[in-house]
């Protein structure tokens, strides 16, 4: 258990006293933790397979179809009837020709064409589709919600619910990674500028002004045209253009705090600059930083969605909420697409806003002191 | 009839379920033409008492009892009635002249505002009355000063403007809440003389709030001594000063740094010396930022300091005292030779200075600002040990406990945070932080100025004891000449960066050579102005 300082304990109590923020944090964490295990929740590969008395975990391990007596050496497609039949009968050959008949015989007689079977079974995730699983639908895609696809399918016949779960995870992870990296860079840059001031500050501020006037969208479009886009490349590009947001606040706090008497006292003690910045000044700057973080987090989520919507973001195979929104725009008749995208964004952003509102109140010195 | 009579006044503040009883059972009266002083240390309820007379406290205050001004009840009176009295019959002067004037309004506008409100004067008559008032409070060139803004005036001038505003409607009662505390001693003497003259000329009564007994003795007819929200003693000034009845009054009266430091042994080694020490800040002008001149914060200071010796640096605000202290510690850049233990350190780079930091320490004025609010007392005191290493064979916690005992703090409190301590205790913490490294030189930058009188005496005693025990050399910076006299072997008088006079303490105090030193001493010890006519002083 981490020992909190009295100040932080009071902040935590203040946060908990804000019921809306506290419950939002609880719900958000629950949703995010669940989505971290999305593979166990929505996947087109079974969690567990019992085949010829042997327990297998295809979700974490690769099994070719040949392992079940099939013909292909690629990964077994567990959703087709042939493979289902092979697993449930223990690899009877008739499954490859007439799986329906083989299964009927196996269920009724316990043998197939006189051959004894070794019974097997598969354990599926609650949603037996992954975000990129292309389903065989009886109707043209996008198909409306039904018992199989609770939120319907999109225009390439992929399950919307699975895409929303993976998309939520991707959006939030993307935002957190971007914000963490941008904060570290922004706080360091602001701290150095504010603490040393003078020429360092002057030059760095001018460079930041130049950098800030670079149109980030065009840079991302140009880079995307040259290099195929992926998650980490997009993170790097986003961090490159969002770290400057924090510099101003942190710099101002450091400029103010570097003349505080306790900073002077530390200097008189011979404490090194790095240590003064870390121990004495940074805790002061953190309050201002925390109040800015929500805007950066929601900004990062919105930026990812925007890029995906415009088609300059992640490849279209990835589970993107922005791409879902784009499909909703293209297929206005498929209202489930629009509603899914809208509610996902609305719930996710509202929870984050409520949480950060509580955090900001908890850090408010008027509420923490006395 | 009494002008103001306060009977059984009780004020309490509610905050989040806590009730703080700031004032309890306070009763006093003020006759016409009389000056009553409310004396007490910080938190004794002086200001709250004064503010509650005209309902100037916030809504969180609960006021009980009775306040009658010319027979009319003020407690529970409606806002219109209170507004008629405020600024008209009862005027206020506050402590901080910078923040009590609106920075965006010119002097003329600030003064005429009160005239317009209560007398309906506007335009030329208001302007004429404003000029008359400014002349009365001794502001030179009132015509040009009318257009000035607060930031263009000195502290003393701002306080004069405040007084002019307070006088605008010919009040019957002037409430002065620590009106001279933020001012330099020579200006303080001028303002006190001005207030006394005005009181006589206008026939006002005055309610004077202060923590400084010397001021009380000088201005007040009667005194109320307050402690923890109660009046513990009241009576005519002479009587209270010559025959104090209450132990707290006696304690306050005795709370004056006494005596002189022990002489320094003749063979004491020299710790610090400087010659031609200058701190000049360049002034840049124009497009090319050429240096057109310098602000001479410290100009050619020469000093020597031996082990066990105290050099008192005195001067008013802006005289370069603190700059000098920071310069000899090499915390700001300077020109000129600084010798520490026989070695010239003026050329050392900041990294090379670091090992020397253990030998030279500094204690700052503000015990609230000099302790990092997010660190425990142990962390604060032990910070120097982290840099310079713990004495061998000791745990840092033991070293911290020892030093806390030495400065009379309870070592059991070392896991607490600074805000849980009083001002005096915090200053002890700051001293402990400096002493734990066993330095040879300690720069004390106004270490007692932010503290109450009784606490000041304790801190002075502590500093003297530490000096005796460890043979410390002190560079003692202060504007308070009483404390300086009790601490120093040598004195250096600074004005606007120049060393006007320096020498052994006895010589400077008893036979000052320079006019300015004489003016300073007169202002500090007798609260009198000499050498200049009152009201036309250096601040105008």
Image (spheres, rainbow, N blue to C red):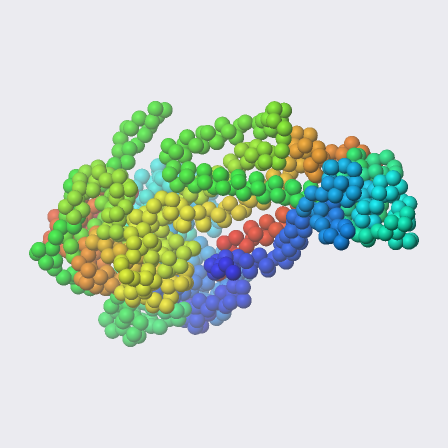
Picture layout, residue B81 above or below residue A338: below
Picture layout, residue A302 above or below residue B133: above
Give the quadrant of residue A333.
top right
Q: Nearer the viewer, residue A74 or B445?
A: A74
Residue pictured at 69% horizontal, 36% vertical: A318
Image coordinates for residue B107, horizontal then vertical, percent: 40, 42
Image coordinates for residue A346, horizontal then vertical, percent: 70, 45
Image coordinates for residue B2, horizontal then vertical, percent: 40, 68
Residue B161 visible within the image: no
Q: Residue furthest front?
A: A114
Residue pictured at 67% horizontal, 49% vertical: A37
Residue B342 visible within the image: yes
Q: Nearer the viewer, residue B334 or B366?
A: B334
Q: How many marks?
A: 0
Q: Nearer the viewer, residue A264 or A227?
A: A227
Residue pictured at 38% horizontal, 66% vertical: B413
Image coordinates for residue B380, horizontal then vertical, percent: 36, 56
Q: Is residue B213 left or right of residue A164?
A: left
Give the quadrant of residue B379.
bottom left
Give the quadrant of residue A156.
top right
Q: Nearer the viewer, residue B507 or B387?
A: B387
Q: Is residue A234 left or right of residue A99?
A: left
Q: Is residue A181 left or right of residue B41?
A: right
Residue pictured at 56% horizontal, 34% vertical: A236
């Amino acid at each position: 258990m981490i020992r909190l300082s009295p100040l932080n304990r009071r902040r935590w109590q203040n946060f908990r006293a804000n019921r809306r923020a506290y419950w939002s944090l609880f719900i958000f964490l629950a949703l995010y933790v669940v989505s971290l295990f999305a593979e166990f929740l929505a996947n087109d590969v079974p969690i567990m397979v019992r085949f010829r008395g042997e327990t297998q975990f295809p979700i974490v391990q690769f099994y070719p179809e040949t392992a079940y007596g099939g013909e292909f050496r690629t990964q077994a497609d567990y959703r087709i009837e042939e493979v289902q039949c092979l697993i449930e009968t223990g690899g009877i050959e008739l499954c490859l020709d007439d799986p329906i008949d083989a299964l009927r015989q196996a269920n009724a007689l316990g043998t197939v064409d006189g051959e004894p079977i070794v019974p097997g079974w598969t354990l599926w995730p609650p949603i037996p589709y992954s975000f990129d699983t292309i389903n065989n639908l009886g109707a043209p895609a996008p198909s409306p919600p039904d018992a199989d696809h609770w939120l319907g399918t999109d225009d390439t016949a992929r399950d919307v619910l699975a895409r929303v779960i993976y998309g939520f995870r991707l959006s939030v992870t993307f935002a957190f990674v971007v914000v963490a990296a941008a904060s570290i860079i922004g706080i360091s840059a602001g701290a150095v500028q504010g603490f040393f001031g003078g020429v360092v500050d002057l030059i760095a501020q001018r460079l930041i002004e130049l950098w800030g006037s670079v149109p980030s969208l065009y840079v991302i479009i140009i880079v995307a045209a040259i290099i195929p886009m992926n998650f980490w490349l997009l993170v790097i590009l986003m961090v490159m253009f969002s770290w400057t947001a924090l510099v101003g606040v942190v710099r101002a706090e450091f400029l103010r705090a570097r003349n505080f008497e306790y900073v002077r006292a530390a200097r008189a003690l011979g404490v090194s600059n790095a240590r003064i910045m870390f121990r004495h000044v940074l805790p002061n700057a953190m309050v201002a930083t925390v109040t800015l973080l929500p805007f950066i987090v929601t900004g990062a989520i919105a930026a990812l969605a925007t890029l995906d919507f415009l088609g300059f973001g992640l490849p279209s195979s990835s589970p993107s909420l922005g791409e879902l929104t784009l499909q909703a725009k293209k297929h206005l008749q498929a209202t489930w697409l629009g509603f899914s995208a809208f509610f996902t964004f609305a719930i996710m952003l509202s929870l984050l806003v409520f949480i950060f509102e509580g955090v900001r109140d908890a850090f408010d010195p008027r509420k923490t002191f006395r | 009839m009494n002008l103001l009579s306060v009977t059984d006044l009780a004020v309490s503040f509610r905050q989040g379920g806590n009730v703080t009883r700031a004032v309890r059972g306070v009763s006093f009266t003020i006759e016409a033409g009389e000056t009553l002083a409310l004396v007490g240390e910080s938190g004794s309820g002086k200001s709250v008492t004064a503010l509650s007379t005209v309902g100037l406290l916030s809504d969180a205050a609960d006021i009980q009892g009775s306040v009658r001004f010319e027979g009319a009840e003020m407690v529970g009176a409606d806002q219109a009635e209170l507004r008629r009295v405020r600024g008209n019959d009862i005027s206020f002067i506050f402590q901080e002249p910078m923040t009590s004037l609106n920075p965006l309004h010119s002097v003329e506008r600030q003064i005429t505002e009160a005239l317009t409100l209560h007398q309906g004067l506007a335009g030329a008559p208001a302007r004429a009355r404003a000029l008359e008032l400014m002349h009365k409070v001794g502001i030179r060139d009132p015509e040009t000063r009318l257009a000035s803004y607060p930031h263009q005036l000195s502290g003393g001038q701002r306080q004069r403007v405040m007084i002019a505003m307070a006088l605008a409607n010919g009040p019957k009662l002037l409430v002065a809440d620590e009106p001279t505390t933020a001012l330099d001693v020579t200006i303080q003497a001028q303002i006190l003389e001005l207030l006394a003259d005005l009181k006589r000329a206008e026939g006002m009564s005055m309610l004077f709030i202060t923590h400084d007994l010397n001021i009380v003795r000088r201005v007040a007819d009667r005194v109320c001594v307050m402690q923890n929200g109660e009046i513990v003693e009241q009576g005519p000034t002479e009587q209270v000063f010559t025959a104090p009845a209450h132990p707290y009054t006696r304690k306050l009266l005795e709370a004056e740094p006494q005596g002189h430091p022990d002489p320094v042994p003749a063979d004491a080694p020299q710790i610090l010396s400087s010659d031609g020490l200058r701190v000049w800040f360049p002034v840049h002008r124009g497009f090319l930022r050429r240096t057109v001149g310098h602000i001479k914060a410290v100009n050619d200071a020469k000093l020597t300091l031996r082990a066990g010796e105290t050099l008192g640096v005195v001067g008013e605000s802006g005289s370069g005292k603190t700059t000098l202290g920071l310069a000899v510690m090499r915390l700001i850049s300077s020109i000129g030779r600084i010798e520490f233990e026989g070695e010239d350190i003026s050329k050392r780079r900041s990294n090379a200075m670091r090992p020397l930091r253990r030998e030279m320490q500094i204690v700052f004025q503000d015990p609230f600002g000099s302790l990092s609010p997010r660190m425990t007392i142990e962390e604060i005191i032990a910070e120097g040990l982290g840099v310079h290493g713990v004495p061998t064979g000791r745990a840092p916690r033991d070293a911290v406990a020892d030093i806390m005992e030495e400065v009379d703090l309870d070592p059991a409190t070392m896991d607490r945070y600074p805000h849980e301590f009083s001002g005096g205790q915090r200053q002890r913490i700051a001293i402990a932080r400096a002493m734990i490294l066993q330095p040879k030189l300690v720069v004390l930058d106004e270490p007692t100025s932010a503290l109450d009188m009784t606490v000041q005496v304790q801190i002075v005693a502590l500093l003297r004891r530490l000096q005796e025990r460890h043979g410390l050399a002190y560079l003692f910076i202060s504007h308070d000449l009483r404390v300086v006299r009790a601490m120093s072997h040598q004195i250096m008088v600074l004005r606007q960066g120049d060393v006007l006079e320096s020498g052994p303490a006895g010589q400077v105090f008893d036979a000052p050579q320079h006019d300015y030193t004489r003016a300073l001493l007169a202002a500090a010890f007798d609260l009198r102005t000499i050498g200049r006519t009152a009201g036309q002083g250096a601040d105008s």
